[in-house]
Amino acid sequence: MEALTESEIRAAFVNCSKGEAKRLFVPRDLDTRPWADLDYLGWRDPKAEDRAYLVTEQSGRRAALVLRSPSVAAGRGSRNMCSICLTSPEAGVSLLVAPKAGRAGRDGSSVGTYLCSDLSCSLYLRGKKDAGAGARLHETISLDEKIARTTTNLAGFIAKVMN
Ligand SMILES: [Zn+2]
């Protein structure tokens, strides 16, 4: 994806208030991120480990999500499969929950997905980060097809949050 600036990222949040989008933690090293190899940029708040965020852009449509780990300890180390990139990384998979956009979210409605705990799906797929032994199923499809599947899965999740 194309590199985004902090203000572009803050403006892209779909499932929190404008005030929260202004205050939440955004990494300061955005210009050193490997954007060309990212299907989405994901990060955690170093001061609040249960808070995670991601931003993506597909067909010119940008969306950023606020995510929460319902229990930080539970997902860690377990080798479930990430629902977005279908990797089972050694670093673990977390159940992350996104409040729904708009009124439904304010009323407490949310959607969850299993996601690589370190939000590194894009790098695992491309072999830029080692996910550990046995982390990926052997598949005959090409990298482009895996990337397409990942972005489709992510778009599906975002659609559920927006819905
Ligand atoms: Zn993943």
Image (cartoon, rainbow, N blue to C red):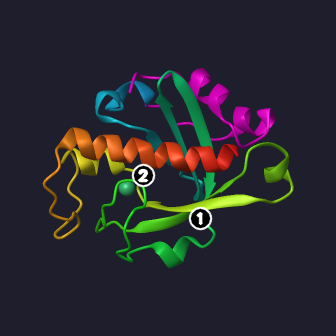
Question: Is residue 90 shown above or below 124?
Answer: below
Q: Quadrant of residue 81?
A: bottom left
Q: Is mark 2 within 8 Å of ligand 1?
A: yes
- Which quarter of the figure is the N terminus placed in? top left
Q: Residues within 10 Å of mark 2 (few under 14, many from 20)?
A: many
List x then y, in percent, for residue 33: 36, 32
List x then y, in percent, for residue 148: 33, 40
Q: Are marks 2 and 1 in contact (CB under 8 Å)?
A: no
Q: Is residue 73 left or right of residue 139?
A: right
Whether 53 is among the magenta residues is: no
Q: Residues within 10 Å of mark 1 (few under 14, many from 20)?
A: some
Residue found 71% across the figure and 35% down from its top: 21
Q: Quadrant of residue 87?
A: bottom left
Separation of marks 2 and 1 at Cα, in angstroms? 12 Å
Disc 1, SS: loop
Q: Is residue 12 or residue 145 the one in the foreground? A: 145
Q: Is mark 1 within 8 Å of ligand 1?
A: no
Question: Is residue 119 shown above or below 88?
Answer: above
On the rendering, which quadrant does ligand 1 occupy? bottom left
Q: Which residues are magenta?
A: 1-29
Residue found 16% across the figure and 69% down from its top: 133
Q: Is residue 25 or residue 94 the one in the foreground? A: 94
Residue found 47% across the figure and 46% down from its top: 154
- Say what amino acid the circle numbered 1 marks: Ser
Disc number placed over residue 119 in the picture, else none: 2
Disc number placed over residue 69 in the picture, else none: 1
- Say what amino acid the circle numbered 2 marks: Leu
